[in-house]
Amino acid sequence: MPRWLAIAFALGCGALTAIQSRINGELAHAIDDAYTAAAISFGSGLLILVVALAVWRPGRRGLAAMAAALRDRTLPWWMLLGGVAGAWFVLTQGLSVGVVGVALFTVAIVAGQTLGGIVFDLVGLGPGGRRPLTVTRLAGAVLALGAISWAVWAQLERDVPFLVMLLPFVAGVVGAWQQAVNGRLRGVASSALAATVVNFAVGTAALVVATLLHAASAGWPDAMPGEAWLYTGGAIGCIFIAGQAVLVRFVGVLVLALSGVAGQLAAALSLDLLVPTAGGRTVDVATIGGTALALVAVVIASVRWSRHRHVATEPRASEPEAGARSPGESAERPEG
């Protein structure tokens, strides 16, 4: 896949993330229960994936390959826990979006994804191996953090709880980690579907436990809303998580995160300006300016970095991990 096309798909995945944030936030507001809303989102996605797995044989072969790798200890067990990070992200959507709005939520995600992407690329956690920290990547990261400070400062002056802003930041960090380990799972299984099923199964299990514990003290929602679109968050999550699992090999964790951020920012600002949440904050100049500055940071870190890496892309095909996956990828191509 050409890098420019992978980045374009990553932009689309980012836009879907912002749309899912709005949907899950609205569902949590409608039932006044972020835990149940997150469990519904992940659980519905898992049901969709199980049906897909029943009719897609390469996906079932991918699960068998992951099981064999676990038995051989060539796949660390903790790489199966990406779904916990996804569960935390979806839960954070329900807890934060209705308070701070999609745009500010997404801006806070930028900081976490940027820092996480740099660290996980440096240690080589993703399927593409280690990717050095260049001047342009560092400049983009610093500029993104400056954008976060600008956008968040005005909101904090209006008594937005610091913890509410910290939740999406942490979600961004663990989200970058999730992208890296899901990409490794996809490489072992040669199947984005298999990796996504594991992600949703683990995340659903974590959210069901959290929901039961929360319901034991706070009770269950009195009624469920009738609007069908409020239950589409899981289906949207299936698309962008599977897409990220495929794309991370081609562009790395940081570029995937920052390219996705560009899509998130564009979609999030559009949603907050055109369809504001009932209890959300008004989008002010600081939020818009910080978002624009973060978008510039994405351009600096991703476009210039992709040009630098284009020269080094071909030799990577000779690496053992890439060569080991290439036969399975051709069989899986229709899925991507």
Image (tube, grey):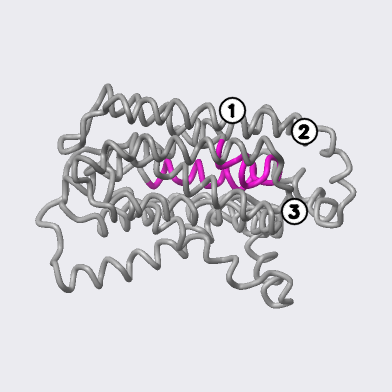
Give the spatial CA distance, label 2 vs label 1: 14 Å
- How many angstroms separate mark 1 from mark 3 (CA)? 23 Å
* In contact (CB < 8 Å): disc 2 and disc 3: no
Say the numbered circle drawn on residue 266: none
Q: Residue furthest top?
A: 274
Lower sequence index among marks 1 and 3:
3
Q: Position of residue 1 (x, y in %)?
A: 73, 33
Give the structural element (helix, strand or loop) at label 1.
helix
Which quarter of the picture shows residue 39?
Answer: bottom left
Magenta residue check for 114: no
Residue 258 left/right relative to 185 = left
Query: What amino acid type is highlighted by mark number 1?
Result: Val
**Residue at x-position 34% and y-position 42%:** 105
Under mark 3, the amino acid is Gly
Residue designated by label 2:
308
Image point (58%, 44%), residue name: 244
Image quarter (top left, top right, bottom left or bottom right) of the C terminus: top right
Q: Position of residue 299 (x, y in %)?
A: 59, 27
Q: Name the residue at 30% across, 68% down.
A: 210
Q: Which residue is mark 1?
A: 299
Which of the two discs, 1 and 3, sits closer to the camera? 1
Q: Secondary structure at mark 2?
A: helix
Magenta residue span: 234-258
Callout 1 environment at 10 Å: few (<14), some (14 to 19), or many (20+)? Answer: some
Single out the mark in the foreground, 2 or 3: 2
- 148, 71: nearer the viewer: 148
Q: Which residue is mark 3?
A: 129
